[in-house]
Amino acid sequence: MAEILIQNAGTVLTMDDARRVLHGADVLIRGGEIAAVGQGLQTSGETVSGRGCVVTPGLVNTHHHLYQNLTRAVPGAQDALLFGWLQRLYPVWARFTPDEMFVSAQLGLAELALSGCTLSADHLYLYPNGARLEDTIHAARSIGLRFHPTRGAMSIGESDGGLPPDSLVEDERAILDDMIRVVDAFHDPSEGSMCRVGLAPCSPFSVSRELMRDTALLARDKGVMLHTHLAENDEDIAYSQAQFGCRPGQYAEELGWTGDDVWHAHCVKLDVQEIDLFARTRTGVAHCPCSNCRLGSGIAPVRAMRDAGVPVGLGVDGSASNDMASLSAEARQAMLLQRVANGADAMSAYEALEIATRGGADVLGRPDCGRLEPGKRADIAIWDTTGVASSGSWDAAALLLAGPTRVKHLFVEGRQVIRGGELTTVDLPRLLERHRGLAQRLMEG
Ligand SMILES: [Zn+2]
């Protein structure tokens, strides 16, 4: 089996169970796996110099809406609160076709890869004009990232008192049928899998109680994970109390939406009882600090969640609510926000990197990813710390305290997806040209 040796790295942050930090160390890749981590390793295969670099597990993105990068910085949505923001953007998204879904997913995954991400989830909850989940799966294959797409859904349109226009909602029977179709066609449960499908009604305010319950039953039947938005801001809590007579945590629990096969995005407004519920049930959280800041939603109680034992990963969220989808920037923001809320010692750069790597992998049910140790998948980010951003730094914590924010090399399942800062899998200038063309068409209406 082909071997690649990352040789003589300045620092290797293993994120293994002992959280070992090695200096002057090597990482040996064999096939799609990490074969060894340590000093003085040898290979007859290819070598990649790690000199002057920090080597980390690939970062893991647990929440995104890739399609939204065609609607960045839209006037009228730049400064709106969540519900107003959605209402500005729904009519634009209603014009998307399979082309927009494919190209935006390619662009979004390329952007993530450049920021050190090797595994991303995606939450696609609208399917206008023949768009399908596999439009994004094909895009992920072309970029070479490990991908956890989720079949999202909305079923309560304007005429039923919901937020989205009727043209963007689907019949609930059709939603469940398509969920079954995409799981059967694309979900790969095996170790080292490059594609696992999850089920993900958009939020408790865009589908019925019955669909939430039926989706949970279906996910358990198929052995796939569940994902949705929960407790994002004060409006969200007020809606839950008015419509369901309870807080979001209770609603989730009653409908089968807790457990180690469930992860919820945002959870900014979880209270003490809900944090305890999530910790007891090992329910995961996708923390999206930039999006929470951008939409003024608040600061998620990540310190309290981590202390209680809630599994927490990071998410960049959709590019219309965090116009910059950089996972390294997201890790930095997570660290800074906990310090704003709880003091300068509330979260170290190393803890934020842990959340960004093994934390996210655990949230997505991937203990085979997110750490550099023998037998784990060879998903590896290599950061050049000899450049302007990190020159003069005394410690690898500079990765979040200073930079760089882009990787030099990136490996996914042992395959080099970025070499010397450039994508090896697609022609980026051509992709950008195509993407700009589609955005222009949407802008002109
Ligand atoms: Zn979201």
Image (cartoon, rainbow, N blue to C red):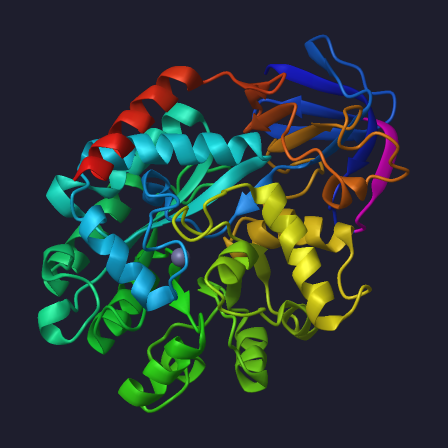
Examine the rendering and report whether any part of residue 369 can be seen: no
The vertical placement of 68 against 36, above or below, is below
Q: Nearer the viewer, residue 158 or 252?
A: 158
Q: Position of residue 32 (x, y in %)?
A: 56, 27
Q: Which residues lie in the magenta part?
A: 18-25
Q: Nearer the viewer, residue 244 or 195?
A: 244
Per the image, is 23 magenta?
A: yes
Q: Quadrant of ligand 1?
A: bottom left
- Quadrant placement of the N terminus: top right
Picture quadrant where residue 411 is located: top right
Q: Position of residue 78 (x, y in %)?
A: 40, 54
The vertical placement of 439 against 82, above or below, is above
The residue at 50%/49% (across/down) is 316
The residue at 74%/72% (across/down) is 342
Q: Nearer the viewer, residue 130 or 7?
A: 130
- State the predominant SS element of the stretch in magenta: strand
